Image (tube, rainbow, N blue to C red):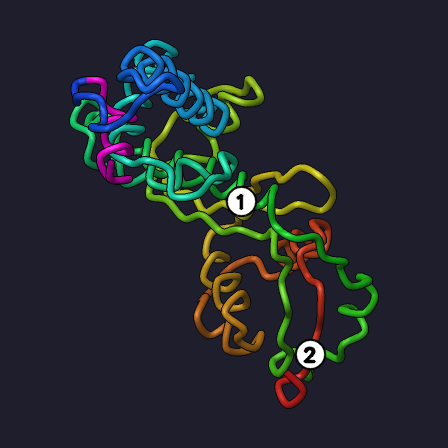
């Protein structure tokens, strides 16, 4: 029996039982395999339900369960860690015809994935706020900031932060279709998505790539720098400060 045959049959009940599969008495293990196949599928669907609570609310429990089953069959796990399962969901949604009338769903999935990644990211100790404040203004351009492993940046053409808040915190739904950039920070245990000031996302993306503050500012254009720094500091996002020559 090949592993490929076993894996294919495990997630697709229309396939025959893997050839050569027997029970401890040497009999064909058809019924036992059916039970095992059902348990595996149910576990993976439940993992997706846990991973994407906003998606579930947006499409409804029944539809989500059917959609999750299609996802499981199209994208079997690549890791034994269920907490990592579902990374293919955004691309799956972008190609799933029944939700083509909801074009913001892939970005909602990306936001929920980023929140989960942030939750499981390594811990890091933020720098003291006064250390950043002590840098002379004329030296800021040559400073590099090391950002926390839990930081995530999600950019969207849709108001996904407003949609997430409406479904997770019972806030009013968005009234207009506007692009939103979200910064996910985890100052303590649970990650939290923050709506970024317009134009701040390119600046943070450049910092995350290891660029100096001066280079990051050139990449960003006009935005509220003070509000962005305040968010980074309050969220414990800056874990080291280095000059351009010492980085």
Horizontal side of residue 213 vs 114, given as left or right: right
Horizontal side of residue 53 vs 71, given as left or right: right
Q: Are marks 2 and 1 in contact (CB under 8 Å)?
A: no
Q: Which residue is mark 1?
A: 117
Badge 2: residue crowd in 10 Å (few <14, some 14–19, many ≥20)? few
The mark that comes first in sequence, 2 or 1, is 1
Answer yes or no: is residue 187 visible.
Answer: yes
Which residue shows up at 33% across the image and 31% down it? 105
Horizontal side of residue 15 vs 117, given as left or right: left
Quick one: 23 or 238, which is closer to the camera?
A: 23
Answer yes or no: is residue 58 visible.
Answer: no
Q: Which residue is mark 2?
A: 242
Quick one: 94 or 21, which is closer to the camera?
A: 21
Helix, strand or loop: magenta stretch: helix
Name the spot of residue 88 as percent of width and height, x first.
33, 40
What's drawn in magenta, residue-wise? 1-13
Name the spot of residue 147 as percent of width and height, x first.
62, 62
Quadrant in which the C terminus appears: bottom right
User: SS for tag 1?
Assistant: helix
């Amino acid at each position: 029996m090949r592993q490929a045959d076993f894996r294919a049959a495990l997630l697709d009940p229309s396939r025959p039982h893997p050839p050569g599969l027997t029970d401890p008495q040497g009999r064909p293990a058809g019924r036992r395999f059916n039970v095992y196949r059902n348990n595996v599928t149910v576990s993976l669907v439940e993992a997706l339900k846990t991973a994407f609570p906003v998606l579930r609310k947006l499409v409804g429990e029944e539809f989500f369960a059917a959609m999750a089953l299609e996802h499981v069959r199209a994208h079997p796990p690549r890791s034994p860690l269920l907490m990592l399962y579902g990374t293919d969901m955004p691309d799956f949604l972008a190609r799933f015809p029944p939700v083509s009338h909801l074009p913001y769903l892939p970005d909602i999935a990306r936001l929920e994935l980023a929140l989960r990644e942030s939750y499981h990211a390594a811990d890091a100790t933020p720098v003291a706020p006064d250390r950043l404040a002590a840098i002379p203004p004329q030296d800021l351009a040559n400073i590099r900031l090391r950002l926390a492993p839990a930081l995530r940046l999600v950019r969207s053409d849709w108001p996904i932060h407003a949609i997430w808040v409406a479904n997770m915190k019972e806030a009013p739904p968005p009234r207009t279709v506007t692009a939103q950039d979200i910064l996910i920070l985890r100052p303590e245990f649970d990650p939290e998505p923050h709506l970024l000031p317009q134009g701040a996302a390119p600046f943070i993306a450049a910092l995350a790539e290891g660029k100096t503050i001066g280079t990051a500012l050139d990449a960003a254009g006009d935005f509220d720098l003070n509000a962005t720094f305040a968010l980074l500091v309050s969220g414990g996002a800056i874990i080291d400060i280095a000059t351009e020559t010492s980085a």
